[in-house]
Amino acid sequence: MSLMGLMGVRFPSNTLLMVHLGKRYNDLWQFNTQTRLWTALTTAVGPPARSSSCMDIDTVQSRLALFGGNNGVSYFNDLWVYSIAGSQWTQETLISGSIPAKGSGASAVDSQRSIFYVHGGAVSTALQDLWKYDFLFKQWTQVNAGTATSRIYGHTMKHLASQNALMIFGGYNLAYLNTIYQFTLASPASGWTLINPGTTKPAGSNFPSAGFTG
């Protein structure tokens, strides 16, 4: 069975792995690394079934943020938040701003500033835009990223807290990519920087997973 769009994030306590399935499912699962048991987190309200959405964890507020995807007919631009403590999904109600519907984008949460970022993805073609959602003001804003990345979908993105930067790896656009980009949020006009890691590097990949140690 294909699970394109499956997403997993690790809870900071190192005891929980949260997984939202792809292939147009809408179920959320939790794996406890201590008991080694899976638990289906069933809720009365939640995001409609979808694939190719993106998700990350807000470690300060202990919540998951899930954006976009498609159901085989149309694309979504909705943002859902799952409270780990409250065990419930809530759809964010916007006060201002709107992000285009898309799938196969990459997302990252800046937990210290309560901001959720979405980059790239695809509708009829691959995209290279960067958006941020401010949880406090409930507002979407497109980030003027200066020098853009190439058009990418199916990539992974993480927020590097120590440098307040976004980092992207992999994805697809006419070929499987193994490029790394970095975006310094304090100076957005400088745009994305393509990092040259030398001659030894992993193969190109779409829908990779990534995380920082330490």
Image: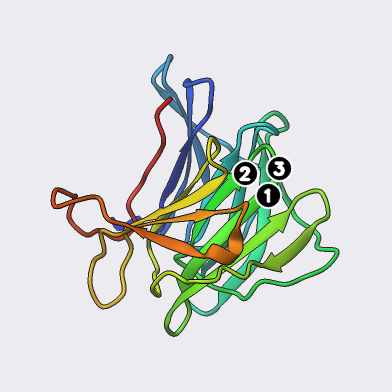
The CA span between labels 1 and 3 is 6 Å
Assign the N terminus to one quadrant of the image.
bottom left
Mark 2: amino acid: Asp
Mark 1: amino acid: Ile
Q: Element at badge 3?
A: loop
Contact, CB < 8 Å: mark 3 with mark 2? yes
Where does label 3 land, which residue? 113
* Residue lying at 57% horizontally and 40% vertically, measured from the top left: 57
**Closer to us: 164 or 106:** 164
Residue 39 on image: x %, y %: 50, 30
Contact, CB < 8 Å: mark 2 with mark 1? yes
Q: Element at badge 1?
A: strand
| Residue at far bottom of view | 124
Where does label 2 land, which residue? 110
User: Quarter-wise, where is residue 111 in the image?
Assistant: top right
Where does label 1 land, which residue? 115
- Report the coloring of the rendering: rainbow
21 left or right of 138 in image: left
Residue 40 on image: x %, y %: 52, 36
